[in-house]
Amino acid sequence: MKEYNYKSIKKFNKLGIEFKDGCIINFNECRENWADSRKINNTDTVCVADRFFSINYSYFIFYTNERIKIVFTKSIFPWDNKHRKKFLEIQIGLNRYGYSSFDCS
């Protein structure tokens, strides 16, 4: 499984997520793989990832052919909540583009 820090995201749009190193998460591929992993028809779901949220450490696991984990860790500065804001941006963005993620919290 590849793992990226959320700060490595270059672009996030309706097709997927692109990282600074050129790696791309394709949401259609993720939807098909997520459905296959749950043994359901891919037309019966819009789920593309699993998500886990906690105060200090959160992540998404996207169901690309080689799973990709995006990690959101808390800064050492107690007032810095940027990691939570970015996590919610991804979650809300997925919903806006017609996709969802499965809550594993």
Image: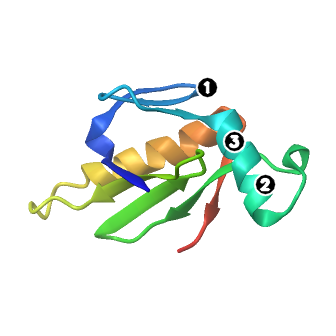
| Kind of residue at badge 3 | Tyr
Foreground label between 1 and 2:
2
In terms of secondary structure, where does tag 2 sit?
A: helix
Viewer-nearest of discs 1 and 3: 1
Position of residue 25 measured from the top left corner of the image (x, y, whole percent): 53, 36
Residue ranking furthest to the bottom: 105
* Percent coordinates x, y for residue 39 in the rendering: 84, 63
> Residue at the location (22% across, 62% down)?
74
Q: Which residue is mark 3?
A: 99
Q: Which residue is mark 1?
A: 15
Which residue is found at the position 9% from the left and 60% from the top?
77
Mark 3 or 2: the one toward you: 2
How many angstroms separate mark 1 from mark 2 (CA)? 18 Å
Q: x and y percent of residue 82 in the render?
A: 26, 48
> What residue lies at 82% left-to-right and 50% top-to-bottom?
45
The quadrant holding residue 10 is top left
Instruction: Pick whichever of labels 3 and 2 is earlier in the sequence.
Output: 2
- The numbered disc on residue 35 is 2
Q: In the image, 74: left or right of 17?
A: left
Distance of mark 3 from mark 2, alpha carbons? 13 Å
Q: Is residue 30 above or below residue 38?
A: above
- Lateral position of residue 74 relative to residue 68, left or right: left
Q: Nearer the viewer, residue 16 or 23?
A: 23
Point out the tag, 1 or 2, that comes first from the N-terminus: 1
Rendering quarter of residue 36: bottom right
Graded by Cα atoms within 10 Å as few (under 14), some (14 to 19) or many (20 or more), the crowding at tag 1 reads few
Residue 1 placement, left or right of 62? left
Asked whether 63 or 16 is in front, the reply is 63
Residue appearing at x 60%, y 46% in the figure: 65
* Quarter the N terminus occupies: bottom left
Tag 2: amino acid = Ala
Asked whether the beta carbons under mark 3 and mark 2 sit within 8 Å of each other, the answer is no
